[in-house]
Image: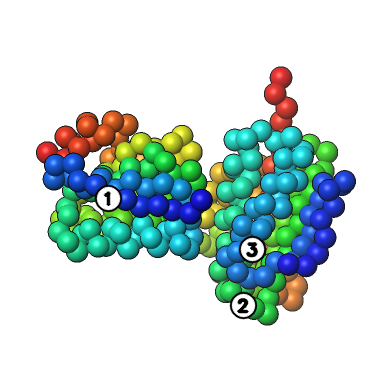
Amino acid sequence: MGGKTDGNTQAVDVYLDSTLESVDSAEELVLKVAREAGFPEEELHKISMAVRETVVNAVVHGNRYSAHKKVHLSACLDQDRLLVTVADEGSGFDPDSLPDPLAEENLLHQSGRGLLLVRAFVDEFQVRKLNPTGAEVRLVKRLTHAP
Amino acid sequence: MSIQVTNRQVGDVTVVDVAGRITLGEGASALRENIRELVAKGNKKILLNLSDVSYIDSSGIGELVSAYTTVTNQGGTLKLLGLTKRVKDLLQITKLYTVFEVFESEPIAVRSFG
């Protein structure tokens, strides 16, 4: 793992290996930022799910476990929003072109639900293709204070 | 905590107690192997007890679906017991609540197999 974390500014910017161990590392790093920001436990769980699914996609589908490719993770708090980006070095993907996991004919498929869960657990979800190669997923989770 | 999978027999129903995390990698594959072995031995009534599952991701959800189709394709029945709120939410989001029969009570679940 390379990069930096800065506890004072509640930010993370690291390059992770394309391994499943990186999924745990990414979850831990982002949760640290989210915890310090004051997200409640149930929201932390949703953030954890969204980050894990996104990093799994980057490692498995984007970088295809390549030892030569990294996953770039960044997380920071911007006022009342947690911003997380996960970038891989794969060939990119169009989320709208993927099969709908909620379609009747796909309900019993073993895979294909990761992005559905990510979208369900964050407030904003965007994918952009990187130049020359790769995909960057941007997640936003708003911090809502209890009244 | 990684996954723990334990089988016990209640009448002719095999209750599979799952504890820990069902996630991509070890957790998901341990559950898959266990279900395949049960089906290969002829167990056709399987109740998956998920009350001690603390975390499940999309791969884990995929394993539940895989377990369901593995058992069903062999003429058996697989039902779920003791879902936590988080797992229930996942089944709602993924529309799998329409696929699985889900129970809160083990005796009622066991009796439902007939």
Chain letter of mark 2 equals: A
Any part of residue B93 in sight = no
Q: Which residue is mark 3?
A: A22
Residue A81: x and y in percent read: 76, 41
Mark-to-mark CA distance, 2 and 3: 13 Å
Q: Residue furthest top?
A: A147
Q: Are marks 1 and 3 in contact (CB under 8 Å)?
A: no
Does residue B88 sit above or below A61 in this rendering?
A: above
Query: Label 3 is found on which chain of the structure?
Result: A
- State if disc 2 and disc 1 touch (CB < 8 Å): no
Left or right position of B106 against B31: left
SS assignment at label 3: helix
Report the amino acid beneath label 3.
Answer: Ser
- Nearest the camera: B7 or A113? B7
Q: Position of residue A74 (x, y in %)?
A: 76, 57
Residue that label 1 marks: B7
